[in-house]
Amino acid sequence: MATANDPRLTPARGDIAAAHLEGKVTADRFVSGRLLRVAAPVLDMTGKPERSAGLTTQLLMGEAFTAYEKDAETGLAWGQAEDGYVGYVSLAGLEAATEPDMQVAVRGTHIYPEPNIKTRPLEALPMLARIRQVGEAPGFVELESGGWCPAQHLAPSGPLVADFVDAAERFLGAPYLWGGRSTEGVDCSGLVQLALAAAGQQVLRDSDMQAALGAEVQGPLQRGDLICWRGHIGIMASEKDLLHANAHHMAVALEPLAEAEARIAAKEFGQVTGRRRIVG
């Protein structure tokens, strides 16, 4: 569970901190951040400004990032993602862009240099990546950042699904990636966060934070319930089957909850610590 001044969610270091934290944390200087947006299809975030630093999370195209420090020498920006996560990202993956008005509504799509599917794609975009439309052609939408996407792969900004499990099921078979947050690679809490986002619910990033969502289940499990372990989380696809991104399958997999519980209990995550139901 996130605590006050949790470093994952608090844009503060000993030498610099966000202006709104003045009087709450100690730092050499306090600065107002600059709101930018992710220009890359998927942008990696790390907790340290080192080439060897591990992946902590990822940002998707069009998501907001408040930069508190930009270092031209390292090519990194330090700041806070729109879900609250703090860390370092590549400056090359950011831009000063306008508010997106469209999003990728399918598991993935491509950006083409022309409104023609026979041209060589420029990039691939994952589900929930956001873009701004500036034009259109038959069957295509023109992006503000350049290029064209198939119109049938896009939807206006806002909830994509009524049932967040429907969105989670689109990730079935996607590879497991620690810190991953896209259909190209996702971890357990990334899957939960993205699925809920597709249903219009914005939640925090990590499994310990998500363990406080909703209310404890006081009866039989049902579709959409969250099953929590110490360091892991999954989604009930039915009253018996668990959908989760996990390192055992190295993928997003569907399996009987009883089998997952037995296997996980014998390993590092131990026994189930919570069964949560999203309310509303």
Image: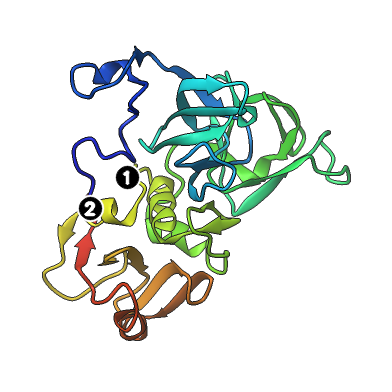
- Position of 159 with respect to 138 (left or right) is left
Front one among 54 and 201: 54
Residue 111 in the image: state x and y as whole percent. 74, 39
Is the Cβ of the residue at disc 1 closer than 8 Å to that at disc 2? yes
* Residue 256 position (above or below residue 107): below
Q: What residue lies at 49% left-to-right and 35% top-to-bottom?
A: 88
What secondary structure is found at the residue carrying circle 2?
loop
Sequence order check, earlier mark of 1 and 2: 1
Q: Name the residue under label 1.
A: 203
- Measured as percent of width and height from the top left, residue 250 is found at 53, 71
Which quadrant of the figure has residue 73? top right
Task: Report if residue 83 is visible in the image.
Answer: yes
57 in relation to 142, above or below: below
How many residues crowd mark 1 within 10 Å: few (<14), some (14–19), many (20+)? some
- Camera-side residue: 90 or 219? 90
Q: Which residue is drawn at 47% across and 28% down?
A: 78
| Type of amino acid at the residue the image marks with label 1 | Val
Identify the colour scheme used.
rainbow
Distance between the alpha carbons at the discs numbered 1 and 2: 8 Å
Q: Hey, which residue is sitting farthest left in the picture?
A: 218
**Rendering coords of residue 123 (x, y %):** 74, 42
Q: What element carries label 1?
A: loop
User: Picture coordinates of residue 148 (x, y %)?
Assistant: 74, 34
- In the figure, 242 relative to 195: above or below? below
138 and 65: which is toward the camera: 65
Q: Residue 213 carries which label?
A: 2
Asked where in the image residue 27 lies, by quadrant, the reply is top left
